[in-house]
Image: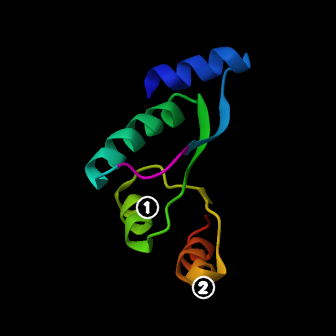
Amino acid sequence: VRQSVRVSLRNLRTDYIDSLVLHSPMKTMEETMTVWQVFEEFVASGEVVQLGISNCYDLRTFRALYDRSEVKPKVLQNRFYADSGFDVDLRDFCAANGV
């Protein structure tokens, strides 16, 4: 994760990234939190402004990330489908928590 962010900063020729988004939750919440904590280090150093996650369709998973993180996700990037009721529960949680 650290190497990927460093390469991105170098390739983009910038000192910081506005929004760093985890592509999807990892296989376990512990693995997700391990990655997220590295992301948080980049926020603390000023190299990243905000964090987010994509492809997180389970409210329990997103809420666990939100509750366990020091730097709260500001972005949830998902496709919302009619078949899933447009994930109203996730969207409500996000609206209530400034995501």
For the residues labelled 1 and 2, the Cα–Cα distance comes to 22 Å
Can you say which quadrant of the picture contains the N terminus? top left
Q: Which residue is mark 2?
A: 85
Q: Is residue 14 visible?
A: no
Query: Dot 1: what SS?
Result: helix
Tell me if mark 2 has few (under 14), some (14-19) or many (20+) residues whose alpha carbon lies within 10 angstroms of its own.
few
Magenta stretch in the rendered image: 22-26
Please state if 65 lies on the left or on the right of 13 as rendered: left
Q: Which residue is mark 1?
A: 66
Please state if 37 lies on the left or on the right of 12 as rendered: left
Q: Residue at x 26, y 49 (%)?
A: 30
Kind of residue sitting beneath label 2? Gly
Residue 31 percent location from the top left of the image? 30, 45
Q: Residue at x 61, y 64 (%)?
A: 99
Instruction: Name the quadrant containing residue 77.
Output: bottom right
Residue 60 percent location from the top left of the image? 38, 72
Q: Is residue 54 magenta?
A: no
Q: Is residue 24 magenta?
A: yes
